[in-house]
Image: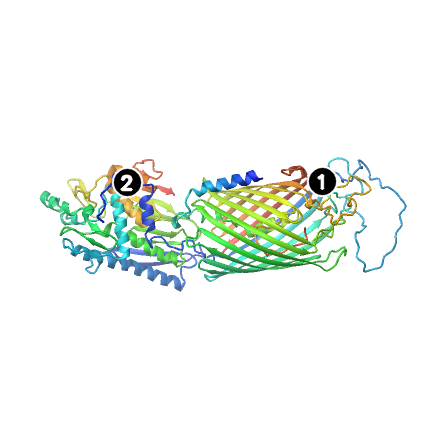
Amino acid sequence: MSRSQDRSLHFRAMGSPCLLRVAGPRANLPSTLRALAAAQHEVERIERRYSRYRADSIVSRINAAAGSSSAVPLDAETAMLLGFADRLFMESDGLFDITSGALRRVWDFKSARLPNAQALAAVLPLVNWAGVAWDQHGIRLPLAGMELDFGGFGKEYAADRAASVLMQAGLSHGYVNLGGDLRLLGPMPDGSPWRLGIADPRKAAAVRLGLEVHHGALTTSGDYERFFELDGQRYCHILNPRSGWPVQHWQSISVLAPACLAAGALSTVAMLKGADAPAFLQSQGVAWIGIEASGRLHGLDTHDRQADASHATERL
Amino acid sequence: MAATEPKSMSPLLGSIVAAACALPGVMPTQAWAEDAPELGVISFKLSGYRDAQLGQGGRPGTAGAASERASALSAKLIGDGQSLSTISRASGGGFGGLGGGGENSFERIHVTSPSVYALVPLGRQWAAEGSLTVDDVSGASPAYYTDMKGASNMVDRRKAGDLKLTHYAGRQTYALGLSHSKESDYLSNAVSAEARFSSEDQNTTFNVGLGLTRDTIDPTTKIVSNEKKRTTEAQFGITQALSPIDLVQASFTFSRANGYLNDPYKLNDDRPRNRNAEVLQLRWNHWFGGSALKLAYRLYHDSFSVLAHTIDLGLAIPFSPTFTITPAFRYYTQSAANFYADPSALAAVYPGPVGTPAYFSADQRLSAFGAITGGMKAEWRVASDWTLDAKFDFYQQKSSYRLIGHGSPGLNTLNAGMWQLGLSHSF
Amino acid sequence: MLALLATACLGLSACASVQPPKPWEKGDLARPLMRMDTDPLEARFSAHTYFSKEAAAGGGGVGGGGCGCN
């Protein structure tokens, strides 16, 4: 591709390295630079609105009002995202629960200690999305100490919004990568697919396999983002909202879907579904690759293959 | 409303995917916006055509050598400048004056045509495209029916070009076009305007077009001189994405031609000075099994009473991202024009009209027949922005191929081969 | 002929039970192979050739101009 050009914008947001990449004949136009800046601003806007680490975010305001009698008013965007989270809750049989952030308080990944049984029992009643009263206009968390956490899909939503900004500006070759959550604008300028890697869950900075993708989004949920190991057992940050304990069936699951928001939601739910993940993902009609706890590959064309780190470039 | 209880129901297929995609801003609203094309294209193509007529001379009553009926004829010289109705000419080119016995194949027309096309985007809202073609034509056509006796060789070169400027404005596009064609005996100039409007979801597009053509006809035989023909066309169409794998298109074209419509090289050709035509075209592109199935149907009717059906079938099969094969098939059938007369059985009259009809034509192209085309196209992407293509079609036109009703009698089979070789570059 | 047209229409109406594509479902329709007009020079030459051999013409576009071959 001697003729095509390439432009990348790197920045940091949502606690992760972010990359916006545009390729093709429009890559170096002034309008493209403006679109890239606008896409970055959109990611930062979503972080400001929905990060629970920001005191001025709507999520923080909702969490601060937990247990009080007044409802926090909602804007249209937040109401839509809550509607989506509600839908996920239903479709995952309650496994995807955006109030499960409260469990963080009893799991200390830095000190590698298992939670106190009583502390866990005390915090479990705070994990209860079904008990939250909300509608298009306002939301009220009934118990003090309850909290909402958009971490399960916030970054993916931002990836889609940023990609839309770029696509709306006429850019159709490139991708958005927010900390590993990918959304493609379209294939490489000559029409050939981007080669996307899936990280090796057990080897830092290594790739387990590659995929050739033309359109859509690719996200991965894994047990290696935040975890500790104790007595040969790994405890990761993906916690079952009913038991309060981490999932253990998969090292990671990667999902391909038209939107990053969908892929991210599905990969998280799949991790939570454990052995039921393949059936669930199949019913959602998406392509996926899972690396089981043993290292065995599942999904796509892998025919449940054994660990094979050498090649594995699958066509989509 | 309270947050809903979880239901142990099996999720709808893709329900989470659909819900995510439906959120505003997750999917761009102008996913396939009508922007000017991103890349320009320049293509070169060399096309060729060669046809051959099977069969005997067609003159009734001659199984062997022609037998002219000698009779006393008188003639009178006429002054210069008077228009002529027909020409007596020496029949050269190896067709002889003999009625052929048995099936012979007479070579007719041979065309070689180099052409070039370019599409240049001018920013995001404008694009210009144009083409230039040169047709080198040589050979002979029958002066009446499929009778190659009396046909004489000719060589001609036609030069044609067209230009179109398109403006892209959100969900509408507007285009203006010019075209020009010149050969030794025919000059044609045309102007056209077209507008397209897409719905908000971009699944539906309406198009409307208007065309005006002005032709000047000056046959080399001087049978007529400086005749004019004027054509007006109007077209309305709708293109609809029916499903993720189906694209359909329907269009209706109405045209009105006035002026000199005769073929000056055909014997005693005398056609009305007006021809109104209506064309209905339906097209369907269907993606399945990794290939594109393309179907088209065209219904044609005009005031000459010609009713024609055309069916086109093509299957574009990509064997690899860089190599595609497209087999194609076409079936065509037409009824005869109402002033077309079958070859007369009377040797004395043939090939002329019986009696004195208002209009007359012995042009096989206005007879009733059917035609079949079978062919194949191959395209290679030789580099990231270079494509090579080659195409060959075999065409056979036969009275008996006519569907519903009888083909016109006394006409021989026409076989033709068409080939194209092309090179295309995007920039 | 009418039977063929009716069959085509039936085929299309059967497809009408499928929904028009959402913006994210247009990947296959966007393929270059699925376009209605794939090769402008080929279209011009074919139209010109058939125009010189048959009575029916047109339906594709307007204002293409004429020639002396028919």
Q: Is residue B156 visible?
A: yes
Residue A15 screen position, x and y as percent = 24, 55
Quarter assignment of residue B333: top right
Identity of the residue furthest to the left in this view: A118
Q: In the rendered image, which residue does mark 1 sit on?
A: B411
Numbered disc 1: secondary structure? loop
Q: Amino acid at mark 1?
A: Leu
- Tell me the amino acid under the disc marked 2: Ile
**Image coords of residue A281 (percent x, y):** 31, 40
What residue is rendered at 76% in x and 49% in y? Answer: B268
- Secondary structure at badge 2 equals strand
* Label 2 sits on residue: A291
Q: Is residue B198 left or right of residue A67?
A: right
Q: Disc 2 to disc 1, how far (Cα)?
A: 72 Å
Residues at discs 2 and 1 both on one chain: no
Tell which residue pokes out farthest to the bottom in this image: A30
